[in-house]
Image: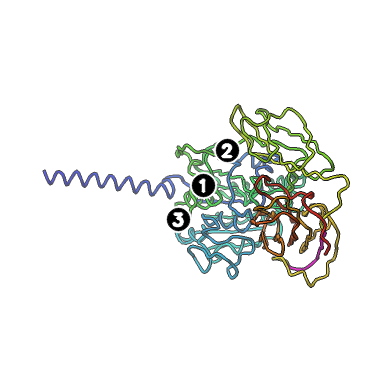
Amino acid sequence: MLTKFRFHYSLILTIALTVLWSLFSNAQGPKGMGIEHVIVVGFDGLSPDGLQNAQTPMFDELMRDGASTLHARAVLPTSSSSNWASMIMGAGPEQHGITSNAWERDNFTLPAVTQGEDFLFPTIFRLIDHQIQNAEIGAIYHWSGFGRLFEKNAVDFDRNPKTEDETASMASQYLKDKQAHFTFIHFDHVDHAGHEFGHGSPEYYKSVEKADALLKLVMQAIETSGIGDSSLVIVSADHGGMGKGHGGESLQEIEIPFIIWGKSIKKGHKIEYPVYQYDNAATVAFALGIKTPVAWIGKPVTSAFEGLEVSDDYPILEQLKQPIILPEADGYKKAGGLFTTSATVKIKNPNTSGKIRYTTDGSFPSKISEPYNGPFEVDGNTVVKSAVFIGDNIRSLVAEAFLRIKPSTAEKPISFELFYLDQLSFIPELDNKKPDLTGRVFEITSDELKDKIKRNTAVRFSTKIKIEKSGRYTFYTRSDDGSKLIINEQVVVDNDGDHGVQENGGTIELKAGEHDLEVLWFNGGGDGWLDIFIEADGLPKQILPTTMLTTKMR
């Protein structure tokens, strides 16, 4: 009996170990998939909006014949270095330490949690090079900055062409010549159009159409190289954009397309579950049977592969489009504006269904909020928030608008000094410098000075703030690049540094009366942005209204 028991126990243990090994093996790529080549094509600054509004027959064909989502998410910050690194490292900035475009191997703040070589988190390039014997690996990248993010000794073909056309040509020739195990191709021109003309502009959509033509050249090269039947192609982006920039936390900046096509991929499949930037490298590893480090947090997008299903109660939440409050937002400029005496508020529903509800006290809309039945007037500083409801349920993001009303006799209460400088990455010392331009404005914002802002411009705003009721007040600066808010010579908000649009806040006790207020801001490159918010008990968070300010002469 004991021998029989031992036999059964041994048999059960063997079966269990076999099942576990099978599961482990499948975690690294199902047997028999037949994927021998993986090509990742990344377009810098390509947003889902671009694919939805430009003419893109090649992208459309890949989505029709493969699996895709337009709701994949980039990592924060939505800057290029952080996201390209996450795409090839299977981890986020918290792990790999590449937290901004200023990162260099000899200039960083957060060290990588582990390293494949000095000061560099292990990338998919290194893993393939170590685990596939005689692997052929290529990297062809339009943006030179990508070249600092991977291990040079892991790559056989390392090229940085000067244009997007050269990039497509060189990548196509490489695919034909080498039939590489792994090829990474990076295009930069879409991001250039976003910065120069603005996301959502005709020029931006034209750059997306150019991307479609370049992608077609790459796909043709894959076919003519003879590897089409054994290749997997992933097409994605590092970030989206808003206005002429990126780096912030908006959905427009953080959502990216993720398209996967080729051998063993489902056709016409809509990916229903969340996909993150670092899942890209994990999916490459899965397809090629590569073992990934424990330090990686990315997961392969297995639901895109034939024969594999995902069952989960938490799919991607696809919401209705949020209402449009007029005057509508323009890039980083919030909806609303500064008006004399009064303003008319109009709200549009961009969806074919749903009911708009809204509030005018800064509170979150609910099923009992006022239904929108037509334009209405406001004659004081007002925060409007609205959302689309289906029945009693909110089904969209909340739209907000900040309407500031000034008297017809109001004078500009803020003085500014503007300085044109060099190589700014932090707010410079300004006390001993002569301004290039001075003047007065109604609000502390870059918008009133937009025609005067260049690269490497610093501005100092000076005024007095009138506090009616003693208490704790929270101030926020929302800026690209750095900013500081100072009250009575005390720094309340420190949002300094070279970064995209980001918000930072601070709280201070203020007595009733007037207080000195100073804001310092700089724009290192691009258009830049600045606005200021205030919040207190009984005062909803809002853009600092000009009616709370009074003249301070320097």
- Residue drawn at point x = 60 percent, y = 47 percent: 235
Work out which residue is located at the far right of the displayed protein and give it: 409
**In the rendered image, which residue does mark 1 sit on?**
230
Q: From the viewer's side, name the closer residue of 431 and 341.
A: 341
Nearer mark to the viewer, of 2 and 1: 2
**In the rendered image, which residue does mark 3 sit on?**
292
Q: What element carries label 3?
A: loop
Left/right of residue 56 with respect to residue 181 in the rendered view: right
Circle nearer the N terminus (3, 1): 1
Depicted 229 relative to depicted 115: above or below: above
- Residue drawn at point x = 49 percent, y = 62 percent: 113
Neighbour tally class for label 1: few under 14, some 14-19, many 20 plus, Cα within 10 Å:
some
Residue type at the position of mark 3? Thr
Q: State how far apart marks 3 and 2 are (Cα).
A: 28 Å
Residue type at the position of mark 2? Asp
Circle nearer the N terminus (3, 2): 2
Indicate the position of residue 374 as horizontal and vertical percent values: 76, 29
Indicate the position of residue 109 as horizontal and vertical percent values: 57, 66
Q: State how far apart marks 3 and 1 are (Cα).
A: 22 Å
Depicted 412 relative to depicted 301: above or below: below
Indicate the position of residue 435 as horizontal and vertical percent values: 83, 67
Neighbour tally class for label 2: few under 14, some 14-19, many 20 plus, Cα within 10 Å:
some
Task: Quadrant for the N terminus, please.
Answer: top left
**In the rendered image, which residue does mark 2 sit on?**
65
Which contiguous range is marked in magenta? 415-423
